[in-house]
């Protein structure tokens, strides 16, 4: 199956509020016609600081249709993605990693091609310049630029 452009979005929640955060995020994204959830995982950190993934269907507090939640996990989020997600999430916080497809780009490609055109680039610019960006240091003393809303 071909996808339009994909983007990995990482949301951070206090560990005890992860299920609530997952619920509100998925409710909002399922209503967005131009975006589609392609893969989703919860990323937690154990007391030793090692990241591990949890399928949404394994979060008992989440409730809902377990089969639907299981279908959201496609396996496209990789172990290296999980390591990067864990590196940007603070202590006592869990993360929701959501891989999104930009459907609108694929929908636009046909009309553009009808006039011998093609989409040659798509650049993500996170918010207005200088706004919504936070520079943090992770546990490996690497500077990372994180986009916030």
Image: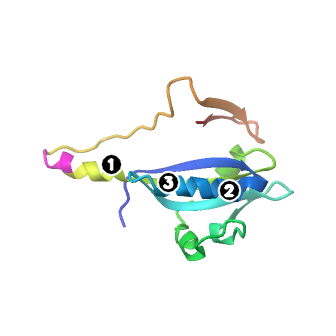
Mark 3 vs 1, N-terminal side: 3
| Mark number displayed over residue 105 | 1
- Quarter of image, res 148: top right
**Residue 78 placement (x, y as % from top left):** 58, 60
Q: Nearer the viewer, mark 1 or mark 2?
A: 2
Mark 1 vs 2, N-terminal side: 2
Q: CA distance from mark 2 to mark 3?
A: 14 Å
- Callout 2: SS: helix
- Callout 3: SS: helix
Of residues 31 and 147, the one drawn nearer to the viewer in this rendering: 31
Query: In the picture shown, does residue 126 fall above or below 62?
Result: above
- Callout 1: SS: helix
**Residue 77 placement (x, y as % from top left):** 56, 60
Q: Residue furthest bottom?
A: 67
Q: Which residue is mark 2?
A: 20
- Quarter of image, res 120: top left
Q: Which residue is mark 3?
A: 29
Q: CA distance from mark 3 to mark 1?
A: 17 Å
Secondary structure character of the magenta stretch overall: helix
Mark 2 vs 3, N-terminal side: 2
Q: What residue is shown at x 70% (from left), y 51% (from top)?
A: 86
Q: What is the magenta range?
A: 111-115
- In this rendering, position of residue 115 left or right of residue 97: left
């Amino acid at each position: 199956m071909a996808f339009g452009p994909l983007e990995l979005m990482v949301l951070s929640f206090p560990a005890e509020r992860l299920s609530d955060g997952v619920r509100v995020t998925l409710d909002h994204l399922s209503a967005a016609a131009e975006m589609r959830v392609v893969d989703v995982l919860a990323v937690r950190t154990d007391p030793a600081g090692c990241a591990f993934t949890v399928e949404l269907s394994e979060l008992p507090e989440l409730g809902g249709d377990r089969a639907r939640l299981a279908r959201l996990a496609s396996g496209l989020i990789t172990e290296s993605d999980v390591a990067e997600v864990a590196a940007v999430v603070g202590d006592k916080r869990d993360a929701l990693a959501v891989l999104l497809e930009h459907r609108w780009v694929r929908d636009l490609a046909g009309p553009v091609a009808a006039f011998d055109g093609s989409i040659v680039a798509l650049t993500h610019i996170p918010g207005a310049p200088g706004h919504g960006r936070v520079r943090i240091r992770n546990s490996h003393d690497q500077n990372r630029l994180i986009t916030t809303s």
